[in-house]
Image (spheres, rainbow, N blue to C red):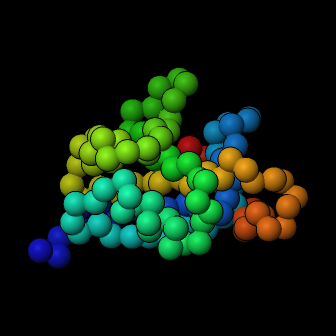
Amino acid sequence: MGDTIATLFIHFRGKLVEEPQLSYIGGRVATFSIIDKVSYFDIVDIIYELRCPRHIKVFYQLLEISANKSLGELQCDTNVMELFTMYGEGAEVNIYVHDPFSIEGDSENEYGISGVETRI
């Protein structure tokens, strides 16, 4: 007990953009150590504790990046099992929270930190 199964780096309150290159711009990063099995709803509850809206989409970075896909979407427990199987024990996993209803220039939704960009 006490061993970390995985560390999640949850990128939130930023913006997922596809052009010119898939990137997550702005926002914050919260780090969580996972020490026991988790479900999809456990991960979503963590994200809601970060005060993210309820209509978000959750993505994770794939290890094997193909020409057209570098993110997988977390939608259920099966996706969570696939994620941890792919990464293995002790992994560090980037999770990206996307708000599809975020409007550029809307001060309620602009949480980003100027100049911060993560290329995916």
| Front-lying residue, 47 or 14 | 47
Instruction: Report the quarter where the C terminus lies.
Output: top right
User: Vertical placement of 99 versus 20: above or below?
Assistant: below
Image quadrant assignment for residue 4: bottom left
User: Vertical placement of 12 versus 20: above or below?
Assistant: below
Whether residue 112 is visible to the viewer of this picture, yes or no, is yes
Image quadrant assignment for residue 63: top left
Q: Is residue 25 left or right of residue 83?
A: right
Q: Is residue 6 left or right of residue 46?
A: left
| x then y, percent, for residue 59 | 50, 46
| x then y, percent, for residue 61 | 46, 44
Q: Give the residue drawn at x 33%, y 70%.
A: 33
| x then y, percent, for residue 86 | 28, 41
Q: Is residue 90 left or right of residue 52?
A: left
| Front-lying residue, 115 or 76 | 76
| x then y, percent, for residue 66 | 47, 26
User: Vertical placement of 33 versus 65: above or below?
Assistant: below
Instruction: Report the quarter where the N terminus lies.
Output: bottom left
Q: Is residue 48 left or right of residue 89?
A: right
Q: Give the residue drawn at x 73%, y 67%.
A: 111
Q: Give the residue drawn at x 43%, y 45%.
A: 74
Q: Give the residue drawn at x 50%, y 35%.
A: 70
| Front-lying residue, 110 or 101 | 101
